[in-house]
């Protein structure tokens, strides 16, 4: 609730997420966590994107939290984008993504002008790594900039070690496997599965990646949607690599405690939450597989068909979130008594937290991994791009809380942000999907051990966010660091102590 402390002496955090669902959602959650600590929070976004989370923010404000929106016009037409394209998921195709990233630089001028009018004076900027230009604004106004990656400490350490070791210079082809140097585990990858921020293939992309790395060198620190107990040794080593300025404050999705918050998190859902819960209530505990490939599903039509046939062949009840639908296959009609198909946005946190869910077939986006872990649900890994192949290694090889679909990828399907080419990878077929689902749901010794591990991590995730938990304490440390920074700059600052 509001404090009696002088308004002008209170902390004020400015959060600027990339306009893409997987980046916006955790930062909106983070805004609520900061606001619950009696911090003024301003979220910077564009008109169309503000509508996606307006209801959640409005409820937070009604409850007494001080969260504001700074809405900047997005000049789509002036930057060569289709009119009204303000989010990566609104682009005509993945090939437009890098143009979108370049277009976001046009927000710098309006952000800087608006920054002058923010009251009280901002204490720090927490911005997406894809906005390296925010470092210039932070420097101009003499405040710290904290970077948000939206990935794990595991991936960040892998990325750091690959770049520092220059191992890519001695790796000849896309398909030559190499071991990521300096890790506690033997993690084998290829150039083909690397995000293009690690292995850029054009002059424009090389320049963009250089800008990101230069901005990271001046960043005050990194905030991570993870918790120390999940990736303990990797968090410790990443801390060393970043000189102790890493704060794991997740799983941030756990700030959504009410059914309505879970149902409306991220975007407007196609299915009514009561209809969804009624269907799940009719299933046995731990019997249902939930399948979802994120807001930017990179599966081809043929892969979608194989996935559908594999789910059907597994004989397991399932919930499948799809972005588009293959009507001619008559899949939905054949499986109407056993499957629930959601066409569009799904209330993922609400679904995963239901007792009937026993497995999660995922593209291994980090938000999805964290949400599955929070719910104590086993994971079936089918990565498609970005850092997802590293997340698969963490899930299957390091943590032992999931299985993968099919054989190891030597070459990967790469349709992610910033890269135009499509590199064909090892094909997944319905048999691979069927085997993975059955393996995950098995009751044998290996299956029980996986279940024990993921349930244990689920309990630890929830404890981490409670008062006295590791993430709760890290949030406190981050706030104290910003207060100390202001004190060192001779700026008065107070923040009311909250649980």
Image (tube, rainbow, N blue to C red):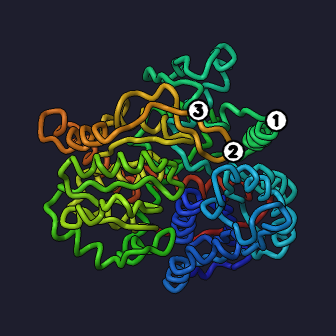
Q: Residue 343: image x %, image y %?
A: 41, 67
Q: Name the N-terminal-most of marks 1 and 3.
A: 3
Please name the residue shown 18% across and 66% down the image: 337
Please name the residue shown 25% across and 44% down the image: 437
Q: Residue 88: image x %, image y %?
A: 64, 59
Q: How far apart are marks 1 and 2 (CA)?
A: 12 Å
User: Does dot 3 land on a helix, a strand or a loop?
Assistant: loop
Q: Residue 12: image x %, image y %?
A: 68, 68
- Crowd band around label 2 with a 10 angstrom C-alpha radius: few (<14), some (14–19), many (20+): many
Q: Residue 239: image x %, image y %?
A: 57, 36
- Crowd band around label 3 with a 10 angstrom C-alpha radius: few (<14), some (14–19), many (20+): many
Q: Is residue 474 left or right of residue 490?
A: left
Q: How far apart are marks 1 and 3 (CA)?
A: 17 Å
| Tag 3 residue | 194
The residue closer to the viewer here, 342 or 281, is: 342
| Tag 1 residue | 203
């Amino acid at each position: 609730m509001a404090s009696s402390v002088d308004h002008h002496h209170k902390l004020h955090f400015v959060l600027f997420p990339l306009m893409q669902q997987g980046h916006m959602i955790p930062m909106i959650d983070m805004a609520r966590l900061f606001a619950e600590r009696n911090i003024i929070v301003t979220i910077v976004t564009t008109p169309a994107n503000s509508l996606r989370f307006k209801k959640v923010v409005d409820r937070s404000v009604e409850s007494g939290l001080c969260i504001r929106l700074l809405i900047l016009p997005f000049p789509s037409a002036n930057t060569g984008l289709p009119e009204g394209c303000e989010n990566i998921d609104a682009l005509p195709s993945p090939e437009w993504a890098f143009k979108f990233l370049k277009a976001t630089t046009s927000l710098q001028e309006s952000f800087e002008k608006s920054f002058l009018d923010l009251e009280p004076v901002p204490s720090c900027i927490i911005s997406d790594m894809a906005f390296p230009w925010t470092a210039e604004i932070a420097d101009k106004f003499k405040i710290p900039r904290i970077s948000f990656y939206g990935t794990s400490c595991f991936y960040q350490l892998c990325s750091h070690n690959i770049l520092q070791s220059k191992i890519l210079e001695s790796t000849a082809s896309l398909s030559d496997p190499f071991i990521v140097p300096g890790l506690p585990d033997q993690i084998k990858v290829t150039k083909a599965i690397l995000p293009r921020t690690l292995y850029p293939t054009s002059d424009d992309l090389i320049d963009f990646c250089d800008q990101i790395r230069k901005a990271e060198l001046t960043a005050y620190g990194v905030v991570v949607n993870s918790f120390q107990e999940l990736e303990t040794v990797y968090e410790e080593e990443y801390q060393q690599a970043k000189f102790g300025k890493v704060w794991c404050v997740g799983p941030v999705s756990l700030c959504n405690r009410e059914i309505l918050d879970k149902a409306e998190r991220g975007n407007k859902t196609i299915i009514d939450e009561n209809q969804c819960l009624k269907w799940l209530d009719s299933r046995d505990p731990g019997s249902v597989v939930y399948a979802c490939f994120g807001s930017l599903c990179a599966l081809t039509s043929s892969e979608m068909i194989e996935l559908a046939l594999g789910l059907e062949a597994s004989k397991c009840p399932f919930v499948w979130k799809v972005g588009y639908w293959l009507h001619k296959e008559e899949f939905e009609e054949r499986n109407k008594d056993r499957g629930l198909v959601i066409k569009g946005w799904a209330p993922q946190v609400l679904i995963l937290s239901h007792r009937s869910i026993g497995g999660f077939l995922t593209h291994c986006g980090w938000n999805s991994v964290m949400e599955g872990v929070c719910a104590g649900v086993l994971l079936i890994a089918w990565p498609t791009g970005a850092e997802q192949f590293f997340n698969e290694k963490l899930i299957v090889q390091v943590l032992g809380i999931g299985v993968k679909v099919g054989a190891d990828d030597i070459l990967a399907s790469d349709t992610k942000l910033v890269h135009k080419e499509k590199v064909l990878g090892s094909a997944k077929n319905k048999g691979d999907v069927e085997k993975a689902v059955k393996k995950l749901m098995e009751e044998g010794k290996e299956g029980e051990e996986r279940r024990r591990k993921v349930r244990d991590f689920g309990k630890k995730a929830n404890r981490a966010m409670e008062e006295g938990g590791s993430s709760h304490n890290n949030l406190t440390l981050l706030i104290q660091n910003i207060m100390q920074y202001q004190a060192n700059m001779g700026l008065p600052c107070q923040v009311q102590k909250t649980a």
